[in-house]
Image (spheres, helix red, strand yellow):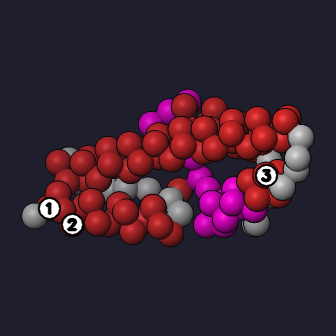
Amino acid sequence: MAGKPVVTYETLREIQRNEKKGEMLYELDDSFYSGVNSYVKSRGKADDEMSRTEVMNAQRILRDIMDRRERKILNQALRSVRANEKADLDRMTGNEKKLFKSILDTLKK
């Protein structure tokens, strides 16, 4: 995702589908999570039931995306330590890189 992405329900579903497809991380912009936060806040202000349902579903999708990404990052760290395989840090957000490096340091110890 190049540039500052505008996050919508559809983009969340697209990212979820891409994360489900393979072992590699789907490339996310560093502003993805703040974009999700803005999207949820804007949709959460609406008083209609449809918007509330959309926000609940979006939060569920985001949790799934995060769970999948965390597992992939952990697996990359394991492969880096066990097989000396180089991880693709370009597909990680800044916070995910920190998580990866922390896991990697722990595994090396």
Tell me what residue is drawn at x 18 percent, y 62 percent: 106
Q: In the displayed structure, does residue 86 sit left or right of residue 93?
A: left
Q: Nearer the viewer, mark 3 or mark 1?
A: 3
Tell me what residue is drawn at x 20 percent, y 47 percent: 83
Q: Which amino acid does the dot numbered 3 rest on?
A: Gly
Residue 3 on image: x %, y %: 75, 66
Q: Which amino acid does the dot numbered 1 rest on?
A: Lys
Q: Residues within 10 Å of mark 3 (few under 14, many from 20)?
A: some
Q: Which mark is residue 108?
A: 1
Q: Residue furthest left?
A: 109
**Is there any visible trace of residue 39 in the rendered image?**
no
Q: Which mark is residue 2?
A: none
Quick check: marks 2 and 1 in contact, CB under 8 Å? yes
Quick check: marks 3 and 1 in contact, CB under 8 Å? no
Tell me what residue is drawn at x 42 percent, y 65 percent: 97
The quarter of the image holding the C terminus is: bottom left
Label 3 vs label 1: CA separation?
43 Å
Residue 6 on image: x %, y %: 80, 57
Label 2 vs label 1: CA separation?
5 Å
Q: Residue furthest front?
A: 47
The quarter of the image holding the N terminus is: bottom right
Disc 3 marks which residue? 44
Give the SS element for disc 3: helix
* Residue 38 located within the stretch drawn in magenta: yes
Q: What is the magenta range? A: 21-39
Residue 56 on image: x %, y %: 68, 39
Quick check: marks 3 and 2 in contact, CB under 8 Å? no
Disc 2 marks which residue? 105
User: Which callout, 3 or 1, points at the residue further toward the start of the chain?
Assistant: 3
80, above or below 102, in the image: above
13, above or below 85, in the image: above
- Total marks in image: 3
